[in-house]
Image: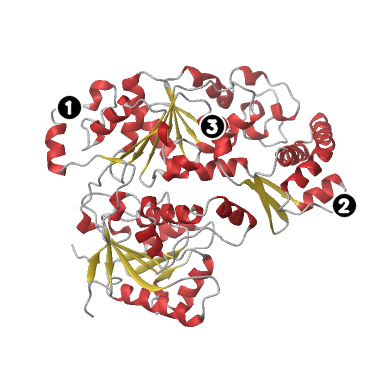
Amino acid sequence: MSVTAKLVPPAPEKPRVVLEMDWQTAELILRMYPPPTLFGAPERFPDWRPHQYEALCASLASTKRVVVHNAPTGFGKELIACMEALMSGRRAVILTSSKPLQTQYSDEWGMLDIRGQNNYPCLATHPGGEFFEEDSAPVMVDEGPCHFGKECSLKSGGCVYYDKLRAAPSESLSVWNYDLWLSINRFSPPHSVRKVPLLVLDEAHAATDRLLSAMAVDVAQWDIRHILKTRSKLPKAEDPVAWSQWAAKYRPTAANMADVAKATGDRVRASKLEAFKRALDGLAAMDVGWMGEERGDHFYFEPIEPARFAEQYLFAGAEKVVMVSATIVPDTPRRLGVAEEDIDYFEYPSSFPVANRPIYYLPTVRMRYGMDAEDTRAMVRQFDRIASSRIWGTRGVNHAVSYVRQQEFRELSEYAPFMLCPKSGEVDAGIAQLRATPPPVILNSPAITTGYNLAGDDARWGVMSKMPYPPTQGNIFKARTEADPRYPLAIAARDTMQATGRIVRGADDWGENFLLDKSFARLIYAERDLLAKWWLEALVRVDGVPQPIRR
């Protein structure tokens, strides 16, 4: 088949500062800079990578409260985050969304690492502890006696979790996960974590989702009926004000039941009732800025817009905020309520050669809900054409987007015998199996987006058959889209960049990505400001399947 390749037109001017420099020139210039170790970096950072020093200087010199770094894979974001704190003398808190990255910061920089209560053993329930019982298994801190009306002496000294919380305000560097940071700021007494001079949001593309998740309220109908013993008609999910009024009526009852369970020492019942009371507290605080939907037996609610809660719970009054990610764009801080005049946005080129990381847009079918069987077969046939010239001797990834699509490929593709199809919750095991299985093998999963590293021979090609819109059927999606028509496109753009970034993890690595859904055209041609420049420069439109990269 003859293939016509057309470079996608360059992106229009955007409100960004793009720091560009020839890679070899950058390396020469960097030799003139003092090494990171001179400023306090660990010995494993003897040199600056290209553009790191310029990025650090730009960030330190900025007079804006929020500084955003769009730094591609391989840039070395960790060094920028920590060196700003060291060189500015500011006490800093670094937030991550993944435990491995949190561990990396802690191990490499020796900083205080703070995690949720369920990560630490309750020493009071271990042998020698004041609440040790031979016939009861030790528990973690989140189930410790201090949560059930008991005065524990370790809470003021000796409990790893509470000791770390007390130490945090005096530590120059500490690393937290988003979920704990948001929970502390939302539920703990005011000033339990002192306002920080410098807040660094690593993996900042995930900040909005983590904030919305932290604010979410989830309550089961079974709990309502069996805890409150009520058979009264419940409000409709799409009426948050009615739910707020309903919850305010039953909160005192739930609080009293939780107190009684604590007093009697029934830890299991007390824990369940405390969670139920907290859900009612969340429901009672809702207003017209929320939306809900039924999910099976549950009522689930989220704020429509995250911006109204970002300052209080995410930024938490920080003097300066640095946001770092490979897929963050100017739209990201805007969704968190940051005014354009309060942002400095810096974007950096990729150190990975474009020839090693092509992203082919091969428009095939417009994927949509309820599409006919022939269109589905046409998409699978296109996938098979790509696989036919690449599968032998390599591993690939099919980003199925949903488990329904995963099953369609499993049933219709002629390469189904080579597919690994992990179920929901089994992705880590699926990736381990991919690495352990000699080629040819294809990982067919909708969950290989952020947080996975498929470098080198782990995967040499990937296919996105459908643009990753968020689920469109629920009330929350509809309300959010009504408030911001570009919301679904922003999510799709972020997830597309994340998914296509799973392969090619180094300057000498190589691999190919394919976009097949015709719906990608809107992103590529009309909404390009939602896509990073390093990603756009690798994008090529093709009319047929090109020859594979061979190294």
Q: Specify which label sits upstream in the sequence, 3 or 2.
A: 2
Q: Name the kind of residue labelled 3 in the image.
A: Glu
Q: CA distance from mark 3 to mark 2?
A: 38 Å
Classify residue 262 as left or right of residue 348. right
Q: Specify which label sits upstream in the sequence, 3 or 1.
A: 1
Q: Which residue is mark 2?
A: 232
Classify residue 58 as left or right of residue 365. left
Q: Which residue is mark 1?
A: 33
Q: CA distance from mark 3 to mark 1?
A: 36 Å
Q: Name the kind of residue labelled 2 in the image.
A: Ser
In percent of width and height, residue 369 lies at 54, 70
Classify residue 380 as left or right of residue 311. left
Q: Nearer the viewer, residue 504 or 500?
A: 500
What residue appears at the point 71 percent right and 29 percent down from the top-left corner? Answer: 147
In the rendered picture of this protein, how many numbered marks are placed on residues? 3
Asked if the residue at tag 1 contacts the one at tag 3, i.e. Cβ–Cβ closer than 8 Å, the answer is: no
In percent of width and height, residue 512 lies at 28, 62
Q: CA distance from mark 1 to mark 2?
A: 71 Å
Badge 3 marks a residue whose secondary structure is helix
Asked if the residue at tag 2 contacts the one at tag 3, i.e. Cβ–Cβ closer than 8 Å, the answer is: no
Q: Nearer the viewer, residue 150 or 229?
A: 229
Q: Which of the 4 image quadrants contains residue 442?
A: bottom left
Badge 1 marks a residue whose secondary structure is loop
Q: Name the kind of residue labelled 1 in the image.
A: Tyr
What residue appears at the point 64 percent right and 31 percent down from the top-left corner? Answer: 187
Q: Nearer the viewer, residue 21 or 91?
A: 21
> Where is the N terminus found, in terms of image quarters?
bottom left
Q: Which residue is mark 3?
A: 311
Q: Specify which label sits upstream in the sequence, 1 or 2.
A: 1
> Where is the C terminus found, in terms of image quarters?
bottom left
In percent of width and height, residue 299 lies at 71, 52
